[in-house]
Image (cartoon, grey):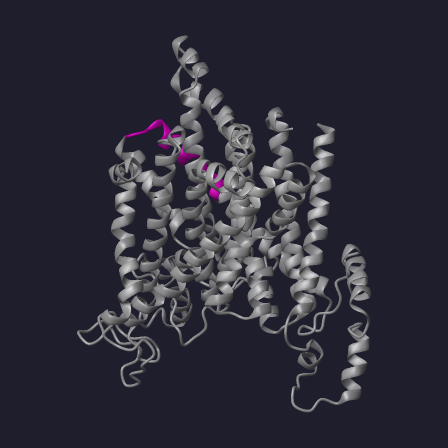
Amino acid sequence: MNTIKRCLQNKKFVFSLIILLPMIFIALFGSSIAPHDPLEMHTTNTLAAASVQFPMGTDEYGRCIFSRLLYGIRPSLTVSLVGTLGAFLIGSFCGLVAGYIGGKAGNAIMRTVETILCFPAILLAMMVVCLFGAGVRNLTIVVVILYIPHFARIANSSTIKVKKMEYVENDISVGQTTPKILIGTIFRNIFSPLIIQISLTISSAILLESGLSFLGLGVQPPEPSWGQMIGDAKAYLSVNMMYMLWPALFLCLTILAVNLMGDALRDIFDPKLQDSF
Amino acid sequence: MKNFILRRIGTAIVMLFAVMTIVFILVHMMPGDPVLQMLGTDTNPDPVAVESLRSQLGLDKPILQQYGSWIFGALQGNMGQSYSEKISVMASIGTRLPRTLELAFVAMILACIIGLPLGVLSAQKRGKISDLIMTTGASLGTSIPVYVLGYLFIIVFSLDIFHFGFAMPSSGYTDISKNAGAHFLRLILPALTLALGIAASIMRMTRSSVLEALSSESVRALRAKGLKEHIVISRHVVRNAFIPVITEIGLQMGNLIGGTVLCENVFNWPGLSTLLVKSINARDYPLIEGCVLVMSAIFILTNALVDILYGLLDPRVR
């Protein structure tokens, strides 16, 4: 309860909520608000400016940009939220177990997981997409793979610190089972650094998904995605600039809100860093 | 110190091997037959031609043998022949790599020139309006994807929507030996695009570490003995605050490489990243292997260098 109060007192947190809540609403109910089918082509009305019929104009095939925008948030949010959740669960588990058992076995788990960090993220993502094909499901898998080591590292170092604490020793001495100690005691105490990492990962994942879709290696047409819309719009920059600017604006606002949420969570859960922004 | 450096170089070599192995495995798992791709026919290929090309490329050998000869060749700088460009992979990368390195290098210098002083200034002006403007700008800077920023620059400076009276070239590349002026003119927008996001991160890190240094006991003592503020900042605070900033710059190397992939695409800069995208679309295995390997090697080496530099500056890290 106290945490929620602290969150709501934080300006950055509230500001990011003001942006993110409508975005989540759009993702859930965009299909009911959208005035047109995002794939429907109005061939007599291509690259049109904003009008009552098309609030943000139309693209090169005469499809309603506003409707495509409303639908286009889904792949970004699906990839980033599901991908982050997967990376969080697997990464934290690996880090937790490696930290708890320690020694050579723990080290081996961590070094294996960290192999992924040898690659710049986008390069590995491009190769995996090239191998398994593009699309939301594969992009989500890419995000999970890429961000496992980040969660594993944090969970690992925190577990190593926490397992020496008296309350863990107490659990061991009263004969608690290992899974109970891991989840019930240690995991609860290393949760705050992981929460901060969750928001960082969501923003990186949105950037990655939109970047790959921009390059044509992400969400495949005709399904809309913001990154892909920006990529498509580049050829028509001098004809209809707003075609690019609308998805760009929505994308930037979402990333800004998630980043601010991360900053806010860091302030709330890690008071030592306060005002380090 | 010597041990630390040797250990770090050792780790880098192990990482390179891991990358080579993963790249090899991934590339060989890719769908599509490269031989058919090279012959340019999927419908009715001449089986004799297919077999002869397969054996010419060494693709008929056992996979372990292919792996061995690939690693051995790569270590000698021989990564085979590009299927689509019909020249050696090294030659193809050789022409493109300097362009990407130039772009990344200029962007990094620009990012430091912009990010470091603004970070120090914003820490000095903490809590004032100018600090708020700078920190908001930095938050925006880290939230705008490279390619969106690139197109914003193109809209403002190349399409000249605000009627500045000039139009910057928005795409392409001119060789420096042909026309140095045009070369640098075409470098400005992509380099600036790449630099701003990184500058914002550097600024945030500089600000927080300068703030930390400013609140230390030693700074209070220096002020108490009557030292002028600018000397306190330039001689003492900045020096102490610099170590985490160097790590941040190192960490940004990964973003820089990722950034070039998108930035080169926006500005049609014919570097390594555009070559990689092209080779992925053409399923040109040796070229994909080469590009990913070279870019990852640069990534690993810069990270190792930054770690070593960090160790030199801060003995606790060793």
Q: Is residue B115 above or below residue B236?
A: below
Q: Is residue B284 above or below residue B250?
A: below
Instruction: Pick whichever, B237 or A255, lies toward us.
Output: A255
Residue at image position (36%, 31%) is A274
Indicate left or right for B276 with B136 as reference: right
Residue at image position (61%, 49%) is A113
Q: Main secondary structure of the magenta part?
A: helix
Indicate left or right for B82 with B160 as reference: right
Residue A201 at x, y percent in the picture: 45, 50
Indicate left or right for A65 with B313 as reference: left
How many numbered discs, if any? 0
Quarter the C terminus of chain A occupies: top left
Residue B162 visible in image: no
Residue B124 on the magenta segment? yes
Residue at image position (39%, 15%) is B228
Instruction: Pick whichever, A48 or B153, lies toward us.
Output: A48
Magenta region: B111-127
